[in-house]
Image (spheres, grey):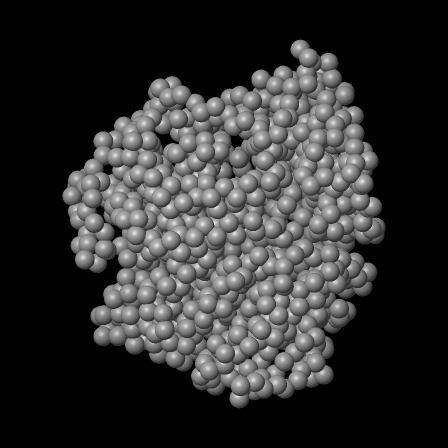
């Protein structure tokens, strides 16, 4: 029977739209935007006479304003001869406009006023967005609007920015996500736009255009002139101003943009031809990972958003409860995770994918794994769409939307401009959250589309080598494509049933009680200790601000044995993973019902958290505690997770060089930290029997620190804590509690005054190297404010100089590092240049910045201070965010719950001269109290910086023409203390003392009388 897809969703709502005009500009206004019942913000939709769609959001209480604009054109519209042009265009709009010609005008203004910005080029749209202190929204928006009015596309800047695009591409060359995605794109029809290479690189944007006599600047201007038309743009502006004031603002700035009458491109033709379906594609990854993906191309389903047929199907296929695909595959030992869902790849087409990771045994049973998945899909067809499942899912969506947490202004505007391209203005807040139409015909239609003969099977694994015979053009990924044997397709398509596969039962964790508890008469502003014994301590805070029927709780089970050596660290990690795996069916249903659970190992123990709707949290906590204290290891799951953990340790070597630099710095400075190689070596001793003994030993003596916050009173909090305490009373901790000196925190090693230490490592997977220069300043109490204000004032200048002008690399970061109570400043640059050369340029930057600070006008200094104050005093938008701030103070054992207010007050008293004096004392090369640790990660791949013996010598003698960089050649010479042995480095240095707590609280275990 032929099914004709129709949408019952209205595309417009005429009754809510009215025509308006102001200052000779006509526009349409839409006031009835459907929003959550608890959303106090005001919304208004506009459509200008030039076709631009606008959403205004007014929130007088906001401490951050924001705006975003999305144009409905992306890299699928790149000219065939210029891959990456849309991406380069996105980069270029930041670098000068006719009204604001300075390259860093926009970003510097935002930084000076507490803001930030970014952009993204997607297949069918390009998004630009920023946030800023509310008082500066209009000025920021004016600079932003010029991107779409009169960008300069300066030729010299264009040539430089191509290097940034190239660096961005090179950063991704060894990342499997990018590699696999491009293989899939390259396999579609050659004449389909999805076949394109969207990132671009130096070859496509510099070398090829010159060889073919293409003027790239002209092509950029043509692309912008053609596609950057307001009738395919969506703008969202969020501010403290009234809707009327925001309306006047956007009409003034955006109504005069010329409408080029273009049509947003759409690609209804499917990317893969019939003969490209029914195939297996084998791909060799960089990391040692194994996965299986079943992919089906589908038409664009956005128009059926009110019915959400794809959500119904992915909800069931991706279910992880009893009777699910995942539970069956785990029982067979073939996989650990399953993800399914529909993705809109571009306007006109999308795909539905089912992805599972594969165990070693699972890799030997790929066809059988696919069979189980199709058995479940076949069961769904035979049983037909179930209205009760739809209604349960619909009610969950309604509940989540009703009590939706407040989003940040940046998140609101970026989500809005995406939705505005696809949905009526009335529905932009609800389209991705709610479903209202029961359409079993659409569900049945989609099920008919996901059959074996229409599937593309993608298998990723290093054991695929013999099945690969091609290399993808842009990333060099090895792959092979093979037609699936008809007998295998028939095996998958057969109608035999698997009795272990069943539809889910009704979810027992769905809450029904959303009442808020009465507020205690003695409610405190900050968390307080309401129970403290040698075994357990309870911090408590009742929420009176967010007023949601939700509670957050965290339980830190502390023990000195968990990190005492590398083996114990691994044993703790395996215990946590196996416990989480054992609880998975239960936790998945809880998570669907808005009740989240987290568990992780730390250097001091095991952290267990529950958060979400308050109603049934006690049920979940009871089941989790029973499993924790009565855990028995499953041998098959143990072997699977042991092998997976070993692979993860080995795979770390493939991570980005900047991640390695951060890791090595922490390793060198932290009192006790095990290297990944030490962890890997100790895995030889890890056995199931040893783990079971360790678990019993760990659980026998622990100290627990609890924090409960939200829709909870003291009695409820005490009841939850008692559940934990009752378990603890059965352990040896009841008789011999842990001592406070067994639970001390880790400290930081102190670099000597004037020391310049250097640690070097290699990376064999990335062409880029990395340089991290860390300036250790001292204890947070006396240094944090100076470190923060210097980071605020230097970060944008550092980015502009080292990335934009000198083009050292795509990744450039300047900011503070605060760890173990110690503050410092660091600059990180990932670059193809040798780290010795990059470090020299960093020192030149620091030299130049002294004059920059000295010449800074007082009003600019004050703006930087106020911007930082605004960032410090920004209020959390949701209960979970406030919970994290409080929990951080408890975990650090500093208990400085109003830290932001105290630091903001201290910051306001700072003078410019104090900052300059601090710079001369601690930051500039040669400063009397300067202490630095440099980490150089050298690339050893072909043409990497670590492969040329001459490169280092040249690096220290090369100079940049300062007529282009505007840097003075101050001395950058320094004598390094080379760190070659971790033990000798640490043994020759003292440790900073622990930070004293802000409140007089006994240390953990302090009540023990032994």
Q: Residue at x 70, y 75 (%)?
A: 32
Q: In the rendering, at what x and y percent does residue 594 appear?
A: 72, 50
Q: In the rendering, at what x and y percent does residue 894 appear?
A: 57, 31
Left or right: 280, with 443 as reference point: left
Which residue lies most toward the bottom here? 24
Q: 895 above or below 294?
A: above
Which residue lies most toward the top here? 1010
Name the one closer to the observer, 258 or 566: 258
Name the one closer to the observer, 439 or 122: 122
Left or right: 52, with 719 as reference point: left
Quarter of the view holding residue 693: top right
Q: Residue at x 62, y 67 (%)?
A: 58
Left or right: 961, with 907 as reference point: left
Quadrant of the frame with the N terminus: bottom right
Task: Decide if residue 3 is in sight here.
Answer: no
Name the one closer to the observer, 148 or 433: 148
Q: 18 above or below 789?
A: below
Quadrant of the frame with the C terminus: top right
Quarter of the view holding residue 287: top left
Q: Residue at x 58, y 60 (%)?
A: 409
Q: In the rendering, at what x and y percent does residue 71 appear?
A: 48, 73
Q: In the rendering, at what x and y percent does residue 258 appear?
A: 44, 83
Q: 31 above or below 907?
A: below
Q: 184 above or below 619?
A: below
Q: Residue at x 50, y 81 (%)?
A: 255
């Amino acid at each position: 029977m032929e099914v004709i897809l129709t949408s019952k969703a209205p595309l417009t709502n005429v009754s809510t739209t009215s025509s308006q005009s102001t200052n000779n500009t006509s526009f349409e206004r839409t006031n009835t935007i459907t929003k959550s019942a608890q959303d106090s913000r005001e919304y208004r939709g506009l459509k200008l006479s030039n076709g631009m769609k606008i959403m205004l959001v007014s929130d007088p209480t906001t401490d951050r304003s924001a705006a975003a604009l999305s144009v409905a054109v992306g890299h699928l519209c790149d000219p065939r001869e210029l891959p990456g042009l849309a991406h380069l265009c996105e980069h270029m709009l930041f670098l000068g406009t006719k009204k604001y010609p300075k390259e860093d005008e926009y970003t510097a203004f935002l930084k000076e006023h507490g803001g930030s910005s970014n952009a993204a080029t997607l297949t069918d749209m390009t998004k630009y967005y920023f946030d800023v202190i509310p008082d500066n929204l209009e000025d920021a928006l004016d600079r932003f609007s010029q991107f779409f009015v009169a960008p300069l596309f300066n030729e010299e800047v264009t040539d430089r920015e191509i290097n940034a695009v190239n660096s961005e591409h090179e950063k991704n060359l060894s990342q499997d996500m990018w590699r696999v995605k491009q293989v899939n794109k390259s396999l579609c029809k050659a004449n389909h736009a999805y076949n394109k290479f969207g990132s671009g690189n130096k070859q496509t944007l510099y070398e090829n255009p010159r060889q073919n006599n293409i003027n790239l600047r002209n092509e950029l201007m043509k692309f912008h002139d053609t596609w950057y038309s307001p009738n395919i743009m969506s703008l969202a502006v969020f501010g403290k101003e009234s809707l009327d004031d925001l309306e006047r603002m956007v009409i003034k700035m955006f109504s005069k943009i010329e409408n080029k009458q273009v049509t947003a491109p759409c690609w209804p033709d499917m990317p893969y031809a019939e003969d490209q379906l029914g195939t297996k594609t084998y791909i060799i990854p960089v990391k040692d990972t194994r996965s299986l993906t079943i992919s089906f191309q589908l038409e664009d389903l956005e128009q059926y958003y009110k019915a959400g047929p794809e959500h119904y199907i992915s909800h069931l296929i991706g279910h992880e409860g009893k009777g699910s695909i995942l539970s069956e595959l785990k029982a067979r030992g073939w996989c650990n995770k399953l993800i399914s869902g529909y993705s809109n790849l571009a306007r006109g087409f999308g795909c539905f994918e089912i992805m599972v990771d594969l165990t070693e045994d699972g890799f030997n049973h790929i066809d059988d794994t696919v069979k189980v998945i199709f058995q479940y899909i076949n069961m769904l067809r035979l049983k037909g769409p179930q209205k009760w499942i739809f209604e349960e899912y619909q009610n969950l969506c309604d509940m989540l939307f009703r009590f939706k947490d407040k989003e940040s202004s940046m998140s609101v505007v970026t989500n809005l401009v995406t939705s505005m391209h696809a949905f009526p203005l009335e529905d932009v807040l609800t389209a991705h959250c709610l479903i209202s139409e029961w359409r079993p015909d659409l569900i049945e239609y989609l099920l008919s589309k996901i059959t074996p003969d229409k599937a593309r099977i993608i298998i990723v694994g290093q054991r695929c080598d013999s099945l690969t015979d091609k290399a993808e053009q842009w990333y060099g990924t090895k792959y092979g494509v093979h037609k699936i044997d008809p007998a295998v397709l028939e095996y998958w398509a057969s109608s035999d049933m698997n009795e272990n596969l069943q539809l889910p039962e009704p979810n027992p964790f769905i809450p029904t009680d959303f009442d808020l508890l009465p507020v205690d008469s003695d409610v405190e502003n900050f968390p307080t200790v309401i129970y403290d014994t040698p075994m357990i301590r309870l911090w408590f805070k009742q929420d009176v601000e967010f007023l949601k029927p939700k509670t957050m709780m965290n339980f830190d089970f502390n023990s000195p044995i968990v990190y005492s050596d590398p083996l114990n660290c691994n044993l703790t990690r395996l215990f946590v993973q196996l416990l989480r795996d054992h609880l998975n069916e239960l936790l998945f249903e809880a998570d669907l019902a808005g009740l989240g659970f987290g568990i992780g190992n730390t250097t001091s123990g095991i952290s267990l958290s529950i958060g979400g709707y308050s109603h049934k949290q006690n049920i979940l906590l009871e089941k989790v505690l029973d499993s924790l204290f009565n855990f028995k290891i499953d041998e098959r799951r143990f072997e699977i997770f042991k092998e997976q953990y070993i692979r993860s340790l080995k795979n770390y070597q493939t991570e980005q060089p900047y991640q390695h630099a951060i890791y090595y710095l922490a390793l060198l400075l932290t009192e006790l930290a095990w290297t990944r190689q030490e962890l890997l070596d100790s895995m030889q001793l890890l056995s199931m029997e040893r783990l079971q003994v360790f678990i019993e030993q760990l659980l026998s003596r622990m100290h627990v620190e609890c924090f409960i916050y939200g829709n909870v009173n003291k009695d409820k909090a005490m009841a939850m804590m008692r559940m934990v305490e009752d378990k603890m009373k059965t352990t040896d901790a009841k008789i011999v509690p842990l001592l406070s000196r067994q639970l001390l925190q880790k400290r930081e090693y102190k670099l000597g005054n004037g020391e310049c230490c250097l640690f070097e490592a290699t990376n064999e997977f990335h062409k880029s190297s990395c340089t991290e220069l860390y300036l250790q300043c001292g204890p947070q109490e006396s240094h944090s404010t100076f470190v923060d204000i210097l980071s605020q004032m230097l970060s944008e200048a550092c980015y502009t100089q080292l990335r934009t002008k000198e083009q050292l690399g795509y990744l450039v970061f300047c900011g503070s590092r605060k760890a173990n109570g110690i503050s410092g400043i660091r600059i990180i640059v990932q670059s193809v240049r040798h780290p010795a050369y990059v470090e020299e340029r960093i020192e030149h930057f620091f030299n130049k910045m002294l004059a920059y600070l000295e010449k800074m006008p007082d009003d600019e200094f004050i703006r930087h201070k106020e911007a930082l104050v605004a960032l410090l005093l920004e209020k959390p938008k949701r209960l979970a965010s406030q919970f994290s701030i409080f929990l951080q103070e408890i975990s650090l054992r500093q208990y400085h719950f109003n830290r932001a207010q105290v630091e903001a007050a201290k910051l306001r008293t700072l003078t410019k001269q104090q900052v300059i004096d601090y710079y001369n004392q601690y930051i500039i090369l040669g400063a009397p109290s300067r202490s630095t640790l440099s980490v150089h990660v050298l690339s050893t791949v072909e043409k990497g910086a670590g492969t040329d013996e001459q490169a280092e010598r040249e690096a220290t003698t090369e100079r940049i023409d300062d007529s282009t960089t505007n840097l003075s050649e101050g001395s950058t010479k320094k004598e390094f203390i080379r760190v070659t042995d971790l033990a000798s480095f640490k043994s020759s240095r003292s440790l900073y003392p622990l930070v004293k707590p802000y409140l007089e609280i006994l240390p953990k275990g302090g009540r023990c009388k032994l």
